Amino acid sequence: MGECMVELTDYLLKLSAELPSRFDYARRLRKRFLFERLAGLVDDYLVGESPKTVLLPGLRGTGKTTLLGQLYFHALSETADVVYISADEARLLGFSLHEVIERYFDVFRPKRPVLLLDEVQYDPDWDLTLKVLHDRRKALVIATGSSALKLKESPDLARRAVHVEVKPLSFIEYLHLIGEDVEPVGLDALFEFDVDRLERALSTGARFAKTAEDYLTLGSLPLTLELEERTAYESLFSLVERIVYRDLPEFRNFDSSTLDSALRLLTIIASPKGERFSYERLSKTLGISKSTVMELVRAFVASGLLIEISPVGGLSKKIRRSPKLKFSAPSLRASLLSKFEVVELAPLLEDAVALYLSGEGILEYEPGKGGADFVLTRRGKRYVVEVGLGKASYTQVRRSMERTGADFGIVIGREFDVRENLLMIPWWSFLGLV
């Protein structure tokens, strides 16, 4: 036991000395929009506010570790009582998160500690550790983890912690990270048919129309920003493999052959015809049961990789019809498509629209031939949304509005036009709203 204690103390002393060089790369990178909010929490705590526990769940590749590195330097400029601990690294060395934190308190005796905890899902008792830390009111805790955190979290911690999801990049945030600062117009302008503000988005869109294509193919996750195309696609594909083989087992104890099927399932969903596959057809194609296909889809949705969109209609229709599945980061679909040498923009645009709209209300789709791509219920109003790189007609939207009883119709295509309850906006300008 004594030897283990010395090892852990040595590890912490070495870690503390190495952190500035470990995160040196993060100094030169621009910061995600979320940084300002988190830095504000650090500042408030250091001037006397009561400590909080902040959980940052999110998909792999969204830049959570870099965000912690930037917060480390921000806190370090005001206090020496800041430490970064990787639960994954601690586990590999044979230490629990609880042990490392307790030893940190014993060795460093911090007065107002800031604990930056990364990938906490790799510690089996992370939930209890964070709950105990919160109840002791001794430290500001900012902890990242996979999207599985939300599923594994106890009701006690869920009530205590502040939750901030780290999502893939929007187009405006992508522009910011590559050095182009543009004021976002916001999605309210779209739903309120606010012509003045939409025209501002039009001018932004016109300036960055070519960059919008780069955003769809490779720009929705920060890890690819400084990589050339081929390397970027390889990095993204490796990320998909890590989600399949490391994250999916967090949701259920899938065996290795099922995980191999999961990767094939994603490839089918990413393909141009993937949307037409029902659960039954996927089951037959993959040679696994329909219930396993459904379990895998649920796990991909829970991991943050896929967005699940139910059909419009009553419960029986939702049960009968398979959901529409979109990638939360268009770049991940692009990485799978790149394996076939064809990366088409159209499905990537639909992914981006789903990412933008999924946090705005109840997002559904209209099943059947000629059905609407998306039906959004937002603040008591229903919108039919059609998406297509070259769309320039209201015909399909009008029909869908009649069938679904929608109040408004929006076409995300290539023209700009605003009428009483119909709106058309170029796709690159839509992306430039947020």
Image (spheres, rainbow, N blue to C red):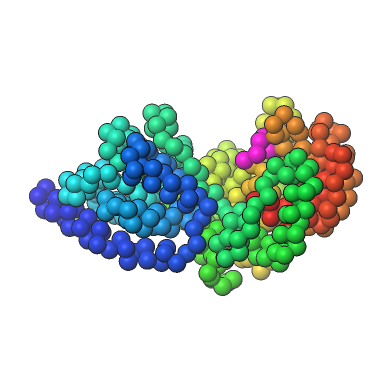
Q: Is residue 198 magenta?
A: no
Residue 364, how many percent across, how many down?
Answer: 70, 37
Q: Is residue 392 visible?
A: yes
Snapshot quadrant of residue 408: top right
Snapshot quadrant of residue 93: bottom left
**Left or right: 1 as drawn, with respect to 422:** left
**Residue projecting furthest to the front:** 47
Snapshot quadrant of residue 268: bottom right
**Residue projecting furthest to the left:** 2
**Residue projecting furthest to the top:** 315
**Left or right: 101 as drawn, with respect to 239:** left
Picture layout, residue 257 above or below residue 51: below
Give the magenta-colored segment's residue range. Answer: 359-364
For the point 86% across and 53% down, which residue is it? 392
Asked whether 247 or 54 is in front, the reply is 54
Asked whether 329 or 174 is in front, the reply is 174
Residue 63, how many percent across, how many down?
Answer: 48, 56
Q: How many marks?
A: 0
Residue 119, how many percent across, how many down?
Answer: 39, 49
Q: Is residue 361 magenta?
A: yes
Q: Is residue 252 visible?
A: no
Picture layout, residue 309 above or below residue 94: above
Residue 389, how many percent across, how many down?
Answer: 78, 57
For the point 76% across and 33% down, which residue is it? 382
